[in-house]
Image: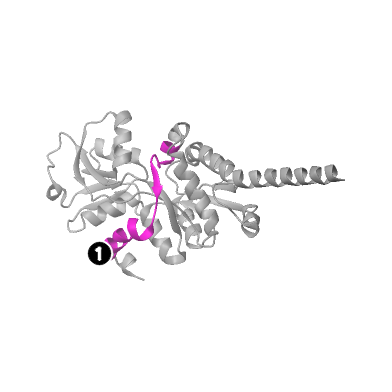
Amino acid sequence: MRNSMKLSRLLLILVLSMALAGLFTLSPTALNSAELEQIKKEYTFAVVPQGPPTLMNENWLPFIDRLSNDTGLKLQIKLYADIKAFEKDLREGKVDFAYMNPVQQIKVWRVNGYLPLVRSKKTIRGYIFVKKDTDIKNLDDLEGKEIALAGSENVCSIVIRHGIQARNVISRYVGSSENIYRNVELDETAAGGTLDIVFEQDLQKINQNFRILYSTEPINPHPISALPSVLQSVRSLVTETVLKYSQDTDAQDMLRRIGIPDPVKADYEQDYLALEQKLSEHSKEFAEK
């Protein structure tokens, strides 16, 4: 009888040990039963369009698949052909997680409180560039001339327009960085504007003689954000998992391709409030509460 009781206790201890081991290896954040139930639902992860959907899928799907696998969350990527459809989903709170630009983060923070979770450590700037052999030497020389920009709602376009608003420089929206370079190269516009990270990366392949005329003040880059209705524990799980990738050598190319090469925690008041206040000073759209 005693042997039977001892065996039963040993079996009970073994079963409990296995259950606990399974629980603590499930995720880096302990979750209660209600939270575990939430994990079973499917979460939509939207990505701001920064190129053709095929290219975006190629860059982002490995990240989404790994994040889903490492967290145990069912993450479904959502890509867009145009930025208006993406921003409409953000305004209506139709996506749980989203990678968005800083200006979009400011807008949706006001509308439905999307919370920035992680961002790249490195700040970004807007560049205005011209051809090396042009007579344009400073911003005053752009007075009355045209500058090629990707689009009116592009974060680079907004920060550049904000930086040169005191001057009469005419914006021409051409749709892509490739078209911006082409416009400047063919003298269809006097200058072009893009983000520093895009310009520096593209210089290696466009082989054109451009020079930087003006650089905006640095701003914090695109965050991965979440609806406040997503459980705190789930948001923390995603945040902690992405932060751990910075220590994983196998994940570096994956992070670089999505534009978050050195992830750090993001906080709205620390990272984006100053930009909101700056834009609000000179823009009716951002001044409206």
Q: Amino acid at mark 1?
A: His
Quarter of the view holding residue 10: top right
Q: Position of 25 compared to 1: left or right?
A: left
Looking at the image, which residue sits at the far right? Answer: 1
Give me the residue at 17% from left, 52% from top: 144
Label 1 environment density (alpha carbons within 10 Å; few <14, some 14–19, many ≥20): few
Give me the residue at 22% from left, 54% from top: 163
Q: Is 162 or 1 nearer to us in this picture?
A: 1
x, y percentage for residue 62? 53, 37
Q: Position of 11 compared to 166: left or right?
A: right
Q: Position of 146 compared to 137: left or right?
A: right
Q: Position of 67 compared to 200: left or right?
A: right
**Which residue is disc 1 drawn over?**
282
Give me the residue at 39% from left, 39% from top: 261
Tell me the chief SS of the magenta region.
helix
Q: Is 10 or 153 nearer to us in this picture?
A: 10
Range of magenta residues: 255-281
x, y percentage for residue 185? 25, 35
Q: Does any portion of residue 96 appear in the rendered image?
A: no
x, y percentage for residue 13? 72, 45
Q: Is 99 or 41 nearer to us in this picture?
A: 41
Q: Does any portion of residue 265 appear in the rendered image?
A: yes
